[in-house]
Image (cartoon, rainbow, N blue to C red):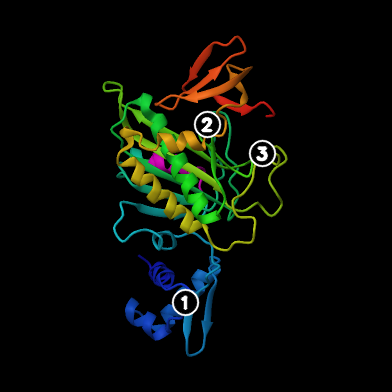
Amino acid sequence: MATKDKLLRMLEERRGRYVSGVTLAQELGVSRNAVWKAVESLRKEGYDVAAVTNKGYTLSQDNDLLSPASIERYLPDSHPFDISVRKRVDSTNAEARRRALEGAPEGTVVVAEEQTRGKGRPGKSFYSPASTGLYLSIVLRPSLRADQAQYLTTAAAVAGARAIERVAKKEALIKWVNDIYCEGKKVSGILTEGAIDMESGCFEHAVLGIGVNVKSPEDGFPAELAEVAGAICDDGRGAVRSELAARILVNFWELYQTIESRSFYEEYRNRCFLLGKPIVVTRNGTRIRARAVDLTEDFKLVIELPDKTTLELPYGEVSTSRG
């Protein structure tokens, strides 16, 4: 690990407190001049590192740049995650999948400040501008069948909703199957992808991605998203992305340990705001009006058609009747 990265970890661990250059140099085993150069490197990357004579250096409490150290600050001392942070990737899911194919262990986490081709539902993208969102993916190696993939998505939705409520202090609801809403606006999307062993029908690996709009982009959301998209922290709240990432990871991992039990089913169902409402289902390019009736124990959406017959949807694009 480079001196700069070691220094960042030390400053993250003592965020808001000043640490003398002498102390940092001694703990790093380098000269004070090397400490100064490392500080300058961090500043060039955008980190707000203050320096005061006779007090030393400190990382601003308002610094919201993501790093492994900033996220690990909110994780328990013992955790299963190997976290890397990239300034820009095509997609954290794509990067995590590449690593999974190279043999990356379960718990490998890819976080990015920006995605150039963020993935949404098939045929759609996830708007992922720099510095305003949280985009992360986890490599998993679950003992699940392919037809149980929905368990991962729904567990992540519950984990994300809990984390958003804790950090943003707003109620977080779920739009079946993989979107999280606050105050009537979509603030998060989840995408699960994987490779299946054709003989067993089980996962060789899975990649779970979650994107969260933390703050609105300076110029606002694109016109095609402006009506539906929102952010969790447009109230001037300071640095929250690292804490949000850590809470999502911890919440999800807790549910993942007993994923086949679906212990989170009731919470998912209670957060699912479509139930009992008129909806529009898009299937094979056709829009069908229906009513969301219930959720099966394996997370299929039960809908009632105008002729009173019911269907169980394992997946699909669904919206409220007002769009």
The residue carrying mark 3 is: 228
- Secondary structure at badge 2 equals loop
Point out the image quarter for the C terminus: top right
In three-dimensional space, the C-alpha distance between marks 1 and 2, rounded to whole angstroms, equals 50 Å
Q: Quadrant of residue 33?
A: bottom left
- Secondary structure at badge 3 equals loop
In three-dimensional space, the C-alpha distance between marks 1 and 3, rounded to whole angstroms, equals 45 Å
**Mark in front: 1 vs 2:** 2
Which mark is drawn over residue 47?
A: none
Q: Residues within 10 Å of mark 2 (few under 14, many from 20)?
A: many
Which mark is drawn over residue 176?
A: 2
**Of callouts 1 and 2, which one flags the residue occurring earlier in the amino acid sequence?**
1
Q: Amino acid at mark 3?
A: Val
Q: Residues within 10 Å of mark 3 (few under 14, many from 20)?
A: some
User: Where is residue 137 shown, x and y percent of the image?
Assistant: 43, 44
**Of callouts 2 and 3, which one flags the residue occurring earlier in the amino acid sequence?**
2
User: Where is residue 49 shown, x and y percent of the image?
Assistant: 52, 74
Residue placed farthest to the bottom in the image?
A: 54
In the picture, measured across the screen, residue 22 lies left or right of residue 197, that is right
Instruction: Give the residue at x 59% y 14%.
Output: 305
Whether residue 175 is visible: yes
In three-dimensional space, the C-alpha distance between marks 2 and 3, rounded to whole angstroms, equals 15 Å
Q: Is residue 61 above or below residue 315?
A: below
**Of callouts 1 and 3, which one flags the residue occurring earlier in the amino acid sequence?**
1
The residue nearer to you, when weighing 301 against 242, is 301
Instruction: Give the residue at x 37% y 35%.
Output: 206
User: Where is residue 186 shown, x and y percent of the image?
Assistant: 60, 41
- Secondary structure at badge 1 equals helix
The stretch of residues the image draws in magenta is: 89-98
The residue carrying mark 1 is: 37
